[in-house]
């Protein structure tokens, strides 16, 4: 009997984890260290892979004008899809009105159960730096410290500047030596991803079992309509917006695109982290979608940092839901403010689990909604975080395909991966 492919093994592990977690309950969390080990191995690869591949990708572009063109196309695509995502979320929430009929008893119970988590999110939001400080913080004072602390925005900035500077190095031998070293690092990290992915089915199984066992599925029954609005919006955005863009702009069939990115989507679902999924996304884009390393090493790390379509859509639905629960009318101006704030808040958002709650607090405060309303949705946030991370990662991959096609560098017959 033929051994199932790695994506199939991961999917089986995820399903078995959900079933076991639902049956066993909270005691199943004892196997979570297996999932944590898988996460740590993946995260171990992220910083060296992002730095080396982004530096090489920038330096090999050669022409600063071409680099600017790739960067401009990437940013334009990310901003456009984020604005579409948040608008779609607002449209669904306004039509369905998931918060209009919540039982006051249920509302008070949710506020009591999750009030502490809401308070923590508000406190973290209020300690965020100003816009000017946040922009200045992109430039690292000590690049080694940025690498040690995995500050992705600073790492990306330093790698870009290093790569640009390398293009102006006069001595070709020096330039070649540096590029060869970092190309070797990048290739080695990709191979390490292949090795780590061999235990992905076990890691995903443990993570899913622990998540379902700890949080349960009962809370979904209370917030089913709200959760359904978010999930439907995310699915529409993935299957229509990304599919249309990939088909019309890049000429790639949706079947090939989703088959190519499927393992990255599964890892994103189980980890709720675009950053942790990044090595897998980069590998699949290069080996299955035909995106050259020169493009993928620039577009994907940038996307994992600033492209949060799923998070933006969820914030739109959540803001309207909370307003409806409290009976607060949000006019056109308030909803336009949500679009603007959610789009801006998604830029620079850390690619880690649960950060969407922090940026949601920013949006709520800006439009004058009660911040304690966050407690109403915390019960299902972990599950929704998993799905919106899949959307974020899928958006990153679609951007890489589209930018590569626009540059005339998309390979119709990509190199096969050993991890396939």
Image (cartoon, rainbow, N blue to C red):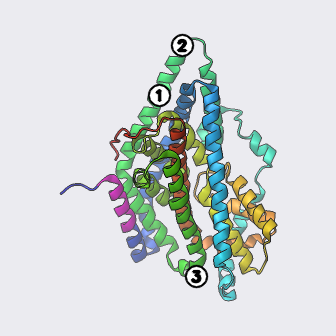
Give percent across and percent down for residue 403. 55, 41
Is residue 144 visible in this depiction of the protein?
Answer: no
For residue 10, what is the image quadrant?
bottom left
Q: Is residue 9 magenta?
A: yes
Give percent across and percent down for residue 26. 47, 73
First of labels 2, 1 by sequence position: 2
First of labels 3, 1 by sequence position: 1
Q: CA distance from mark 3 to mark 1?
A: 51 Å
Crowding at mark 3 (Cα within 10 Å: few <14, some 14-19, many 20+)? some
Mark 1 — residue?
Answer: 183
Figure label count: 3
Mark 2 — residue?
Answer: 172
Q: CA distance from mark 3 to mark 2?
A: 65 Å
Element carrying mark 3:
helix
Q: Is residue 139 left or right of residue 74?
A: right
Between label 3 and label 2, give the one nearer the viewer: 2
In this view, the residue in front, 61 or 413, is 413
Residue 334: assigned label: none
Residues drawn in magenta? 5-16
Q: CA distance from mark 2 to mark 1?
A: 16 Å
Is residue 74 visible in this depiction of the protein?
Answer: yes
The N terminus appears in which quarter of the rendering? Answer: bottom left
First of labels 3, 2 by sequence position: 2
Mark 3 — residue?
Answer: 222
């Amino acid at each position: 009997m033929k051994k199932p492919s790695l994506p199939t093994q991961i999917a089986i592990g995820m399903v078995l984890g959900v079933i076991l977690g639902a049956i066993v309950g909270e005691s199943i969390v004892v196997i979570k260290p297996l999932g944590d080990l898988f996460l740590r191995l993946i995260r171990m690869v992220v910083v060296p892979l992002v730095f080396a591949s982004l530096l090489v990708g920038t330096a090999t572009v050669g022409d600063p004008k071409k680099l600017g063109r790739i960067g401009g196309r990437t940013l334009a695509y990310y901003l456009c899809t984020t604005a579409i995502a948040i608008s779609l979320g607002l449209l669904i929430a306004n039509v369905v009105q998931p918060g209009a009929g919540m039982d006051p008893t249920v509302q008070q119970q949710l506020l009591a159960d999750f009030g502490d988590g809401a308070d923590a999110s508000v406190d973290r939001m209020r300690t965020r730096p100003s816009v000017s400080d946040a922009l200045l913080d992109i430039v690292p004072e000590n690049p080694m410290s940025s690498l040690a602390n995995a500050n992705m925005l600073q790492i990306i900035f330093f790698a870009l500047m290093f790569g640009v500077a390398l293009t102006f190095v006069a001595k070709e031998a020096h330039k070649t030596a540096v590029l060869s070293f970092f190309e070797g690092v990048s290739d080695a990290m990709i191979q390490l991803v292949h090795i780590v992915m061999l235990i992905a089915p076990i890691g995903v199984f443990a993570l899913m079992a622990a998540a379902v066992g700890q949080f349960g599925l009962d809370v979904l029954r209370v917030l089913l309509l709200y959760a359904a609005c978010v999930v439907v919006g995310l699915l529409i955005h993935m299957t229509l917006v990304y599919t249309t863009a990939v088909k019309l702009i890049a000429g790639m069939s949706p079947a090939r695109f989703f088959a190519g990115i499927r393992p990255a989507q599964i890892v994103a679902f189980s980890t709720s982290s675009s950053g942790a999924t990044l090595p897998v996304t980069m590998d699949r884009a290069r080996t299955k979608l035909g995106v050259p390393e020169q493009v993928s090493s620039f577009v994907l790390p940038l996307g994992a940092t600033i492209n949060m379509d799923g998070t933006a859509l969820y914030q739109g639905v959540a803001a309207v839901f909370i307003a409806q629960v409290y009976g607060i009318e949000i006019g056109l101006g308030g909803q336009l403010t949500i679009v603007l704030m959610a789009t801006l808040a998604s830029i620079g958002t850390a690619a880690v689990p649960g950060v969407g709650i922090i940026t949601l607090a920013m949006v709520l405060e800006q439009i004058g909604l009660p911040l304690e309303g966050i407690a109403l949705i915390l019960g299902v946030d972990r599950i929704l975080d998993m799905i919106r991370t899949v959307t974020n990662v899928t958006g990153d991959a679609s951007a890489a395909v589209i930018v590569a096609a626009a540059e005339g560098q998309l390979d119709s017959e990509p190199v096969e991966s050993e991890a396939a």
